[in-house]
Amino acid sequence: MIEFTLPKWYDLHAHFRQGGVLEPYIKAHLDMGCAGALAMPNTKPPTAVVFEDDENNGKYWSIERYMRDLRAAGADKFKELIVPLYLTIDTSPDMIIKGAGSGLLKACKSYPPHGTTGAEYGVPTTKFMDNGVFEAMEQAGIVLCVHGEEHGLSPDHYFDYGQNAETIFYDNYMPIVRDKFPNLKIVCEHVTTKKAVDFVLGAGPNTAATITPQHLIYTIGDLLQGLKYHLFCLPLLKYSEDRQALRKAVTDPNNTQFFAGTDSAPHTTKATDCGCAAGCFTGGIAPQLYAQGFELAGVDLSSQYGQDIFRKFLCENGASFYGFNLLDDSFTLRKEDMPVKVLETSEGNVVPLPLGLKNYTLPWSIKL
């Protein structure tokens, strides 16, 4: 039996939502060996100010408030917890400087307007290039987390074989951001295309990227064949050559720029009359899915060499980029079947990705 032990890891792109469901969603992360998380700020209303005094009569939530709610629901067990500031039309350089000085502000999240769940308050990236926000972030050492897709595209530009919302964004915007703010630390979130991978690789050590387990395992064909809506997430799955680029990046023994960010996004209802909720729920099972993805990429996880490569991606690179410590606390991955179960919450059941695809077991299990 293959079995190896890893330091507890940080999920550097996770969605915990709000209200009564916080506790089971956070517990699912603790149950898969997470020592910390970057909790995305697309709450309702968005977490778009730093201090509670600035919540503006309920227009926005503050990082102070959301952090308090998360910790009360179990996130106090995390060694590290970051809530990025949701960048909106009201974000100012002064807000960045004051937030950074308080220690509450560690990162900011840029969303394409209306481009994904909870992105209604998103603002085009060019706004922050020109209004001093990115400059203030660069000076204060605040990480920019980017959902890298162009918004407002026609369908034939949004997703086509020759181009899509992500490739357009990485062609037209990210090179400008990188050149204009060379010391700004940037995380290209949940990259899905060879174009984005190539950008990260050529952009230097201040640029990194998260990759989800589903984008390592599946392609757009898996989503479309039988219309498996549990695989619907944003950015969309792409083509086999894109998946190959992601696999090559994460399995490179010299990889320092790509790390785990699950984008685990729980929904109690995925398919509705007006569309499909974007997001795959991988809470509780992400290390197992990543291990599956690495094996499909040709990594021998029975070898020390393969285990070291996996450890760098899951446990080391993200911690290093964000300045976290590796922990003595550990968990064990074991090559044995593990049943996948629905997650029960006060708002209904959440179906994990494998179960939504009629996969009732995983080939890897986890032991804390």
Image (tube, helix red, strand yellow):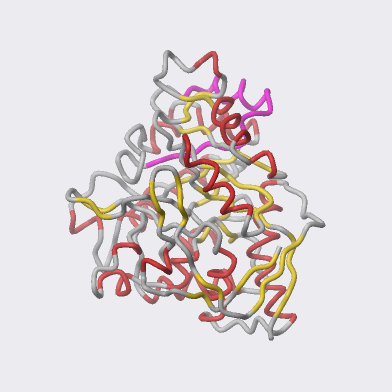
Displayed quadrant of residue 305: bottom right
- In the picture, the quarter occupied by the C terminus is bottom right
Q: Residue at x 34, y 72 (%)?
A: 239
Q: How many marks?
A: 0
Q: Against 91, is 178 above or below? A: below
**Where's the N terminus, which quadrant?**
bottom right
Identity of the residue drawn at 54% across and 76% down: 292
Q: Which residues are magenta?
A: 91-111
- Left or right for 266, reference 7: left
Which x, y percent locates residue 212? 49, 61
Of 142 and 230, the residue lying toward us: 230
In the rendered structure, the answer to whether residue 150 lies left or right of residue 327 reads left
| Residue 215 in magenta stretch | no
* Position in image of residue 152 (x %, y %): 24, 44
Residue drawn at x 34%, y 52% is 278
Residue 42: quarter of image:
top left
Q: Nearer the viewer, residue 81 or 170?
A: 81
Above or below 245: residue 109: above
Image position of 64 with respect to 166: above or below: above
Quadrant housing residue 135? top right
Residue 241, image x and y in percent?
39, 75
Q: Position of residue 83 (x, y in %)?
A: 57, 37
Q: Is residue 110 magenta?
A: yes
From the viewer's side, name the closer residue of 124 and 262: 262
Rendered residue at 45%/47% (across/down)? 345
